[in-house]
Amino acid sequence: MWYVRPCRAGRLSGAMPSPPSALGGGWRLVPYIAPSGRCEVVDSLNALRGRDMRQYAHFQHVVRPEMEVRGPFEVNGRYWESLGQGLYEIRFGKGRIYCSVIGLRRLIMLYRAVIKRWPKFRPEDRRFCEQCKPDAESADYDQEKREYLYRNLCQRRTANGTP
């Protein structure tokens, strides 16, 4: 799924898949991991996998590969919408992932995944994304170090018995 091993039912998943190949556009979708090690996108998508496998599979096998190959600006409004101030929405059914584009590195930084049951971008989601964006775009953001923190968080969850 991602470069990060997701927590599932309090356990680390098995083998990590290879990163996507750089066919066509060579874009990468990267989940934002907070300095605390928390990753809302991976946790939300894992929860979605348990609730609605069809929607999860649509994101993983249709939307995500198309974004990686064609890039976000080539998929048109079917899966992609600008929310202003450098924030975007990836759409798949009722699922939404709020993100930003880091153009020089050809990354789509994923901040928050939600099931959208309201007509507009909620202010609390906007605030969360606006707080994460400067950290993700800074030169100090180290994805490998954050993945290590996320794996440690997953191990602590396992030890505590929380998913």
Image (cartoon, rainbow, N blue to C red):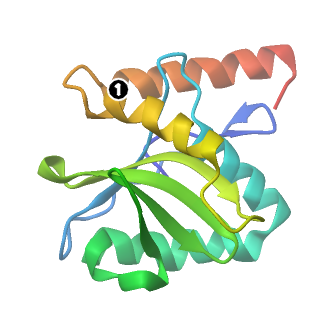
Tell whether 27 sits left or right of 156.
Answer: left
Q: SS for tag 1?
A: helix
Image coords of residue 44 (percent x, y)? 68, 48
Q: Is residue 40 left or right of residue 17?
A: right
Q: Is residue 37 above or below residue 92?
A: above
Taking the spot 59% from the left edge, 74% from the top edge, the residue there is 92
Which kind of residue does numbered mark 1 sit on?
Asp
Label 1: how many Cα within 10 Å (few below 14, some 14–19, many 20+) = some
Q: Residue at x 76, y 21 (%)?
A: 157
70 left or right, relative to 4: left
145, above or below 55, in the image: above
Residue 106 x, y percent position in the rendering? 20, 55
Which of the 4 image quarters holds residue 142? top left
Quadrant location of residue 11? top right
Quadrant of image for the C terminus: top right
Residue occupying the point 37% across, 36% down? 133
| 76 left or right of 51 in image | left
Can residue 22 be seen here? The reply is yes
| Number of marks drawn | 1
Vertical position of residue 116 compared to residue 17: above or below = below
For the question of whether residue 14 can be seen, the reply is no
**Residue that carries the numbered disc 1 in the rendered image:** 135
In the displayed orientation, state which residue is furthest to the left.
104
- Compare residues 142 and 156 and report the one nearer the observer: 142
Residue closer to the observer: 66 or 6:
66
Q: Position of residue 90 (x, y in %)?
A: 49, 66
Residue visible at 34% across and 50% down?
85
Counting from the top left corner in percent of width and height, residue 156 is at 71, 15
